[in-house]
Image (cartoon, rainbow, N blue to C red):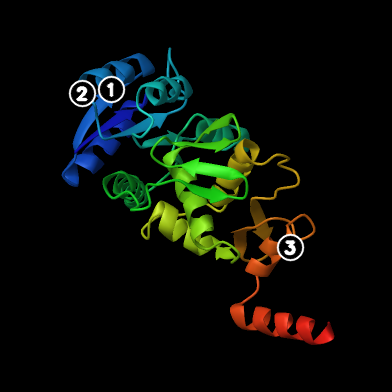
Amino acid sequence: MTILIAEDDPLTLDALAACVESEGFTALRASDGKKALELWRNHKPDLLCLDIMMPGIDGFEVCRRVRNGDPKIPILFLSAKNEERDVITGLGLGADDFIRKPFTRAEVMARIRAALRRVQHPSAEDDHFTLGDLVVQPRALCARRGSQNIDLTPREISLLRLLHTHRGQAVSRDAFLDICWGLDYYPDSRTLDQHILLLRKKIERDPSQPEIILSVRGIGYRHGWSWSKAPLSKKFDLFPEGILFHFRMNLKSAV
């Protein structure tokens, strides 16, 4: 498999290339954004590692152009920039991950393998699924609400699918990281929250009052409508069958 590394610092570029080559990958090296785009067009690599601050065309613009041509290729950002707005910008452009410098060889390889596994072994649930009034279409990498079309990344699809699978239940932060990033992923403390923040901006009617992705303090997140806004049939669905049975029997006896 081939990995394209775009990094303007020669020492870092050589070290990363040697790292992936020692693991059996082929490394393509680019010292600027223009060269990175040229290598991507000519060689069609399996994954991109992009530095943000590069001469000429920066990593953000490279990511934007690559995503327009290939919505599924894994893209990782390698950067010393720690501002949250830069992370949000990168994720918004379709990047799969954001690795802050300095990083270890083990961390980089773990994240590369996790990103490649998601592409090589997609979920069997390729058909559409619903979250409230949102219809998610994994194959098309989008969601629909009425006539509105919302573009999604593979990672965002994975997050929504996990919430759908465990709808009505709280999903822990560890479960999100293990399933959506990979068991050998080295998590940043804000990785999940940053993805959820961006995803809410895309899919919620009012991101400040989310109805699809709800926070569960001390645990993680869950999918569910607000209890006060949910229809009666939806409220019944949230009860275990035994509790619902006794509720119905008590209601009949009261009548």
Q: Residue at x 40, y 47 (%)?
A: 127
Whole-percent x, y for residue 71 in the image: 39, 30
* Residue density around tag 3, few if under 14, some if 14–19, many if 20 or more, within 10 Å: few
Is the C-beta separation of discs 3 and 1 under 8 Å?
no
State the residue position of label 1. 40
Q: Is residue 146 left or right of residue 31?
A: right
Residue type at tag 1: Trp
Q: Nearer the viewer, residue 41 or 108?
A: 41
- Helix, strand or loop for disc 1: helix
Whole-percent x, y for residue 228 in the image: 80, 58
Residue type at tag 3: Leu
Q: Nearer the viewer, mark 3 or mark 2?
A: 3
Q: How far apart, in angstroms, are the residues tagged by discs 2 and 1? A: 6 Å
State the residue position of label 3. 232
* Residue density around tag 2, few if under 14, some if 14–19, many if 20 or more, within 10 Å: few
Q: Residue at x 71, y 41 (%)?
A: 207
Q: Is residue 12 visible?
A: yes
Q: How far apart, in angstroms, are the residues tagged by discs 3 and 1? A: 53 Å
- Helix, strand or loop for disc 3: helix
- Helix, strand or loop for disc 2: helix
**Residue 48, located in which quarter of the rendered image?**
top left
Whole-percent x, y for residue 236 in the image: 68, 69
Q: How far apart, in angstroms, are the residues tagged by discs 3 and 2? A: 55 Å
Residue type at tag 2: His
Name the mark on residue 43.
2
Q: Which circle's residue, 3 or 2, is located before the other in the chain?
A: 2
